[in-house]
Amino acid sequence: MQRNMRRSAAAAVFAVAALSLSACSGSSRSTEDTAGNSQQPPSSKTGESNSQPLAGVKPCEVFTSEQATKLGLSGPGTINEFDNSTCDWKLGEHILGVSVYKDMALNEINFSGDEKTRTTFQGHDALLVRSNERQCSLAFATSGTTSMLVRSTVDVSTPPDTACNLVKKAAPMVEATIFGN
């Protein structure tokens, strides 16, 4: 009897895990606001075509040498070992990362349960995301099917606003490099 209960419990745990994973991996083309009303997914700048603005963009090449100097980046970034669409730079005890999503719309980026705020950035639909007080991300649409993410993780010894301040400084530079502004 006890063996059957263990099997049933294990099967239930497996089923819940499988459902959770499938819910995270599915992409939906519409979202619901807090009132339950269906909304269109975030898009890029008004009037932008759905061409591939990121086609030739490499994540470790999004900053000019002048921009890198202003940010205090020493040396080239390195491709993230878990995500080859992301490049990371060390800034002392901080990390600055840029992700280039050539086939992922803004609404398809999975932020789990992180605190998200819809906003606009340089005329693009965007999400400001706070995982905790030491991490901050800004994701923005570059077309209807592509997006970018600029994120920062800072050391615990720094003031809490440091992560978002770094993102606010770096994101306009990335956008300017991509769109030539």
Image: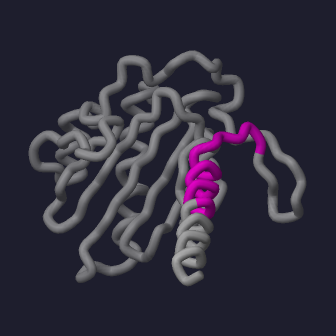
Spot occupied by residue 105 in the image (x, y as percentages of width and height): 59, 35
Left of 131 or right of it: where is 41? right
User: Is residue 26 found inside the magenta-colored segment of the image?
Assistant: yes
Residue 69's place in the image compared with 96, above or below, is: above
User: Is residue 115 found inside the magenta-colored segment of the image?
Assistant: no
- Seen at 55% across and 70% down, the residue is 7
Nearest the eye: 26 or 94: 26
Nearest the eye: 154 or 63: 154
Nearest the eye: 121 or 84: 84
Residue 2's place in the image compared with 85, above or below, is: below
Left of 33 or right of it: where is 18? left
- Seen at 17% across and 68% down, the residue is 93
Task: Name the quarter where the N terminus is drawn.
Answer: bottom right
Spot occupied by residue 44 in the image (x, y as percentages of width and height): 63, 33
Residue 109's place in the image compared with 33, above or below, is: above
- Picture quadrant of residue 169: bottom left
Spot occupied by residue 79 in the image (x, y as percentages of width and height): 23, 40
Q: Magenta region's main secondary structure?
A: helix
Task: Name the quarter where the C terminus is drawn.
Answer: top left
Left of 126 or right of it: where is 139? left
In the image, which residues are magenta? 15-30
Most distant residue in the front direction: 1
- Seen at 21% across and 50% down, the residue is 89
- Seen at 71% across and 41% down, the residue is 28
Spot occupied by residue 115 in the image (x, y as percentages of width and height): 58, 68
Residue 67's place in the image compared with 163, above or below, is: above
Nearest the eye: 126 or 132: 132
